[in-house]
Amino acid sequence: MERIKAQMAAYWSRRVEAFAGLRYREFKSEKHEQWLAELDRWLPKGGRLNILDVGTGTGFFAFLLAERGHHVTGIDLTPEMIAEARRLASGLHLPPEFYVMDAENPGLPAHSFDVVVTRKLTWTLPHLPQAYARWHELLKPDGLLINFDADYCREKEPGQLPAHHAHQDVSHELMQQYGRLKQSLRQTQQPRPQWDVQLLSRAGFHDIQVDTGVWQRLYRKIDEFYDPTPGFALVATA
């Protein structure tokens, strides 16, 4: 399974430039407020939160939350992603801290975060049960996990994609690599989000909620950020 992690990091290292551009444009678009609305739907109200953004990529969630005055730490397995996140943070004059770390076992103190957030990461993790257990350890009592994802390992190949979508600039070679990664990871996962609910409960989370309406709210319009795979939000209390 460590081989899958290495392959995943290599895949994202090749996509970093185009991915960073896409996320920067998303940050400057109407999606900025749409994603904030989804986060605000669940975030505790009042006060400055200590938030961990797991699989931060080039820092999209970290920047949104730092703008709100929260202390944000972003981690990612791919060094090139973290380097780009730091560069963007400097240009945006925002203060998140970014580190290269394994999402399944971050080297961070236990019970040190009010919230863990993540976007489209958990489908890539070959040891998801262990990841959820570790994130539970990182949260303070009654801390919150907010996970946006989709069952990408079981997504149906679209018959015809619209002219604008999130993968429109990805080469055929990289899309084939993406397909091989999904095939390998599918063997380690059960259908989601039902499986996630079981794993979160076993990890010690409670008040587990599944929101399947998030995909319709975020992707009402077909544009360059459009994701054709219906997603969900998982929210759970430590």
Image (cartoon, rainbow, N blue to C red):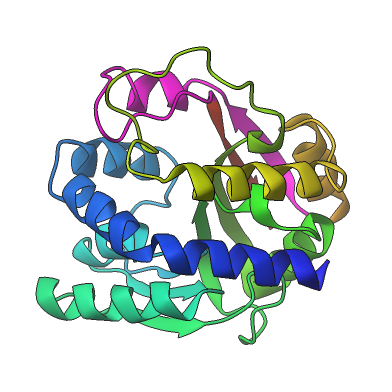
Where 172 falls versus 116 (above or below)? above
Magenta range is 204-230
Q: Is residue 206 magenta?
A: yes
The foreground one among 194 and 137 is 194
Q: Quadrant location of residue 2? A: bottom right
Where 201 falls versus 111 (above or below)? above
> Which image quarter holds the C terminus?
bottom right
The foreground one among 220 and 177 is 177
The foreground one among 22 and 99 is 22
In this image, 43 relative to 67: left or right?
A: right
Residue at the image point whose x is 66% and y is 47% from the top: 123
The foreground one among 27 and 144 is 27
Residue at the image point whose x is 48% and y is 42% from the top: 172
Extreme front residue here? 173
Residue at the image point whose x is 41% and y is 77% from the top: 80
Where 110 falls versus 7 (above or below)? below
Question: Residue 216, position in %: x, y?
Answer: 41, 18
Residue 53 visible to the viewer: no
> Which image quarter holds the N terminus?
bottom right
Q: Is residue 183 magenta?
A: no
Question: Residue 232, position in %: x, y?
Answer: 56, 31
